[in-house]
Amino acid sequence: MTDTNANRGAFHHIDLSVSDVAAARRVYAPMLDFLGYTLVKDRPDGCEWDLKGREPFGASLGIRTATSGGSHDRYAPGLHHLAWRVESREVVDAAHALLVEHGIAVLDPPAHYPEYSGNYYAVFFADPDGLKLEIVHAPGWI
């Protein structure tokens, strides 16, 4: 096996602690399905979705029951938000429609954000614990 470092620096997986797995699943399941992830683990104490078919860069996102209380504060030390890249503005708009259809909290509807980069177009939403999530089309951004 030859190591080409082709996936050096890419995320392997992200695990999120949530206060209510069932409530969080109602947000993550439709959006991750929309983005091409496959549900590979579905238990009352946690779920996991894998993104396959983009080898060697597959990725995984899991949610699990938090073991201590408290609410998410994106301005405290820790994770501020997660963003997923998509191929067009139309896909961002379709993601927004999916959010609305599923009653998922939209923080900011699809819009152009030139302050981030010239062609940055995104929708922002939240999970039940207040974690900010984003679907973005940003051509030219690495």
Image (cartoon, grey):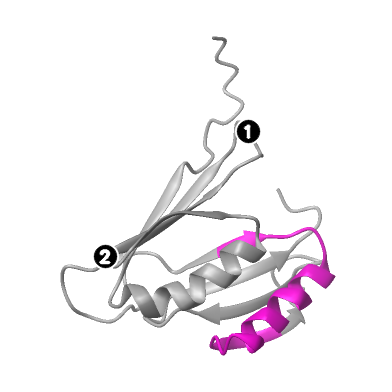
Residue ID at (52%, 36%): 9
Query: Which residue is at the front of the view, 56 or 78?
Result: 56
Above-or-below relation of 57 to 51? above
Horizontal and vertical percent for residue 74?
40, 75
Q: Amino acid at mark 1?
A: Glu
Horizontal and vertical percent for residue 22?
36, 76
* Magenta stretch: includes residue 93: yes
Which image quarter: residue 69? bottom left
* Magenta stretch: includes residue 96: yes
Q: Secondary structure at mark 2?
A: loop
> From mark 2 to mark 1, how far is it between C-alphas?
29 Å
- State the residue position of label 2: 45
Q: Is residue 111 left or right of residue 4?
A: right
Residue ID at (33%, 72%): 21
Q: Secondary structure at mark 1?
A: loop
**Does residue 92 appear in this view?**
yes
Q: Residue furthest top?
A: 1
Q: Which residues are magenta?
A: 83-109
- The mark found on residue 55 in the picture is 1
Number of callouts: 2
Q: Is residue 138 left or right of residue 74?
A: right
Residue ID at (69%, 66%): 136
Which image quarter: residue 55? top right
Q: Amino acid at mark 2?
A: Asp
How would you rate the neighbour count of disc 2 (Cα within 10 Å): few for under 14, some for 14-19, many for 20 or more? few
Query: Which residue is at the front of the view, 82 or 62?
Result: 62
Q: Earlier in the sequence, mark 2 or mark 1?
A: 2
Above-or-below relation of 140 to 116? above
Horizontal and vertical percent for residue 43?
32, 62
How would you rate the neighbour count of disc 1 (Cα within 10 Å): few for under 14, some for 14-19, many for 20 or more? few
**Does residue 75 appear in this view?**
no
